[in-house]
Amino acid sequence: MTPELMLAYVVFCFATAGTPGPNNMMLLASGANFGFRRTVLHILGISGGLGFMVLAMGLGLGGVFRAYPVLHEILKWVGAAYMLWLAWKIATSSAVTDRALGKPMTFLQAAAFQWVNPKAWAMALGAVTTYAPENSGWTIVPLLAGTFMLVGAPCSAAWAGFGQGLRPFLDRPAVLRTFNVTMALLLVASLVPMVAGGDHPAPRSQHDVAAVDLKG
């Protein structure tokens, strides 16, 4: 992988992992409801889950989904249904006095969630089909996965930290309830473009990718 292509890929990782989406809306809500420390496993689960998805896509799973697009459609709608359920759970979560009794996502839950997260599928498939140089073989895949994890983890931590910073303003049950309902609505809103769009990134050549992405 050339330095130019790696730079483009790092920008891609930062943009996809740092912008609003299902993962970051849930991290924001978790940081506000449970605090940063109790959200650390959630953060690590997202990072590890996304890295594993990129690895799986690069080692052959991406080809299966390109050969059978209906599989992606099925997972997209299953994921949408699951996230609507999560949005409902967030909107109806307990009042501030019950925060200590709540349970943030575990590492395994957060990692497994990526497999029903349409944005995670688009990110992982885009990372492999767009940024793996032609004829590079399988050796480039661990680099792509590791880079995604290294760039994504601080982005996730920032969203959880922002949620932690909101905790002093959420001491009243009515305010916390309003916040949680707002987070639930934003989670649903983040799902709309992914469900409505649904196109996969098409593979491009190494030189085309570097030229296009570095131009913005």
Image: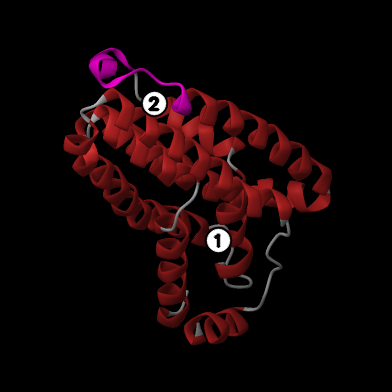
Residue 100 falls left or right of residue 3: left
Along the viewing direction, whichever of 18 and 123 lies nearer the viewer: 18
Percent position (x, y) of residue 121?
Answer: 61, 48
Q: Is residue 155 visible?
A: yes
Is 208 located above or below residue 148 in the figure?
A: below
Say which element carries label 2: loop
Residue extending furthest toward the left = 168
Percent position (x, y) of residue 31?
Answer: 28, 36
Spatial separation of the CA atoms under disc 1 and disc 2: 26 Å
Residue located 35% across and 24% down the image: 104
Query: Which amino acid type corresponds to the residue marked 1 in the rendered image?
Result: Ala
Q: How many marks?
A: 2
Q: Which residue is mark 1?
A: 127
Residue located 29% across and 29% down the image: 33
Is 45 located above or below residue 14 in the figure?
A: above
Along the viewing direction, whichever of 193 and 74 lies nearer the viewer: 193
Query: Which amino acid type corresponds to the residue marked 2 in the rendered image?
Result: Met
Percent position (x, y) of residue 87?
Answer: 52, 31
Residue 128: name its quadrant.
bottom right
Q: Is residue 41 visible?
A: no
Q: Which residue is mark 2?
A: 105
Numbered label attached to residue 81: none
Range of residues picked out in magenta = 90-102
Based on the picture, tell me whether residue 175 belongs to the magenta stretch.
no
Say which element carries label 1: helix
